[in-house]
Amino acid sequence: LPWAGSRLHRIDDFSGARCDDIASKIAEFTVSSNYRAVFAPSHYLGEGVADEWMRVDKDLTIALRRRLDACGGPDVRIFYPLATSMAVFRNQQQRSGIVASLSQLPIQSLWLRMHPFGSHCGHVNLLQYIQACRDLHSLGLPLVAERCGSIGVPLLAFGAVSGLEA
């Protein structure tokens, strides 16, 4: 991908101009390929809302919306992948901070990439995931659970998420 680079990203790779350049390349590719939606570029938030990548990801998402609008893609939807640990996800204070940060973004759905979570998880993790989703519903966005295996069916049944990634 033209915006990916040849090495792992570091925080200092995302100065204001660099964020705009990455967003431009993603927007141009998305619009020229006639895609109707795109994932916001985001990173794993090991420290949750306090993670340095949270600020970078917010800046990238805002720049992406601006660039999509500028290059003829105002109707392209942005899906935001939230990747973090179950320890962060089940922490009420962390979720409140994440909700506050995400509420400022021009996104149309939230894709949940929690680790570890999936078919190997028991009822306690399922309950914690459902409780966490309750807070995220305050954003008014569809929630999509990723890589959750057969435990995704109960998530749908209990109304925790709107969809599952297959």
Image (spheres, grey):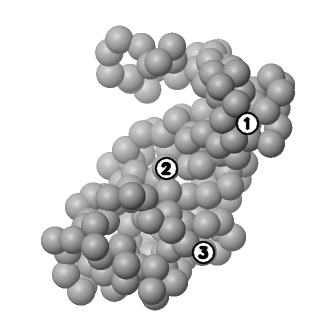
Residue at disc 3, secondary structure: helix
Residue 72 picture quarter = top right
Q: Position of residue 75 (x, y in %)?
A: 80, 42
Q: Three-letter amino acid code at disc 2?
A: Pro
The label number, if any, that marks residue 116 in the structure image: none
The numbered mark, 1 or 3, whose residue comes first in the sequence reads: 1
The numbered mark, 1 or 2, whose residue comes first in the sequence reads: 1
Q: Is residue 95 left or right of residue 37?
A: left
The label number, if any, that marks residue 81 in the structure image: 2
Separation of marks 1 and 2 at Cα, in angstroms: 15 Å
Q: Is residue 70 above or below residue 156?
A: above
Question: Which residue sits at x=55%, y=72%?
Answer: 162
Residue 69 visible in rendering: yes
Confirm or deny contact between disc 1 and disc 3 (CB under 8 A).
Answer: no
Q: Position of residue 33 (x, y in %)?
A: 65, 25
Relative depth, front residue between 76 and 133: 76
Q: Which residue is mark 1?
A: 65
Q: Is residue 124 above or below residue 56?
A: below
Q: Position of residue 152 (x, y in %)?
A: 36, 73
Residue at disc 1, secondary structure: helix
Question: Which residue sits at x=70%, y=46%?
Answer: 77
Residue at disc 2, secondary structure: strand
Question: Which residue sits at x=42%, y=13%?
Answer: 5
Separation of marks 3 and 2 at Cα, in angstroms: 15 Å
Q: Three-letter amino acid code at disc 3?
A: His
The numbered mark, 3 or 2, whose residue comes first in the sequence reads: 2
Q: Which residue is mark 3?
A: 137
Relative depth, front residue between 49 and 157: 157
Q: Residues within 10 Å of mark 1 (few under 14, many from 20)?
A: many
